[in-house]
Amino acid sequence: MTVAVGMYLPFGLAVPILLGGVIRSLVDSRSRVTTTEGAQRGVLMASGLIAGESLVGVSLGLFAYLGVTSIGTFEIIADKLGLSSGGQDILAQWMSLAALLAIAAWVFVRATRRENGGV
């Protein structure tokens, strides 16, 4: 599996795959519910995130086709903060990291929650 992931998937997917494995390990070790229930919740949530990412990708493709290059929200924030282009890149990377960690924490909390119903 490691060789297949390394050969076929882009290198940029290594961190999300690693983070998913870490979350799964934490869910298995700290879960208050049975391992199967927590894992099923996590897999269901991850599947929904993948489907949502696909829909966003199609939407961005549609925007690109229509010629929309930017909505301008990030540029407004960067201008208010007076950031250079290098500063804007750093801000974008930190915002992306914060979003990734927030989603990871959300999946962990929901997967380890004790519920008899769905997610």
Image (spheres, grey):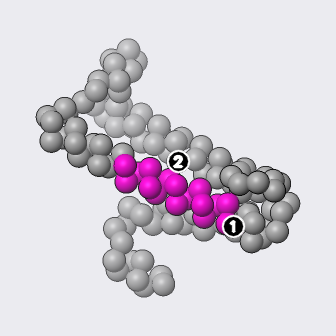
Mark 1 against mark 2, which lies toward the viewer? 1
Q: Seen from this angle, which residue lies furthest front?
A: 117
The answer to whether residue 46 is left or right of residue 84 is right
Q: Nearer the viewer, residue 13 or 113?
A: 113
In the picture of the structure, the residue carrying the numbered disc 1 is 39
Q: Position of residue 1 (x, y in %)?
A: 48, 84
Which region shows up in magenta? Answer: 39-55
Magenta segment: does it hold 101? no
Q: Residue type at mark 2?
A: Leu
Res 4 → quadrant: bottom left
Q: Majority secondary structure of the magenta segment?
A: helix
Q: Position of residue 95 (x, y in %)?
A: 47, 37
Residue plotted at (50% across, 45% down): 97
Q: Position of residue 78 (x, y in %)?
A: 36, 23
Q: Residue type at mark 1?
A: Ala
The answer to whether residue 63 is left or right of residue 41 is left
| Residue 99 higher or lower than 24, as above or below | above
Q: Seen from this angle, which residue lies furthest right?
A: 32
For the question of whether residue 42 can be seen, the reply is yes
Q: Nearer the viewer, residue 23 or 50?
A: 50
Indicate which disc residue 100 carries. 2
Magenta segment: does it hold 40? yes
Looking at the rendered structure, the secondary structure element under dot 2 is helix
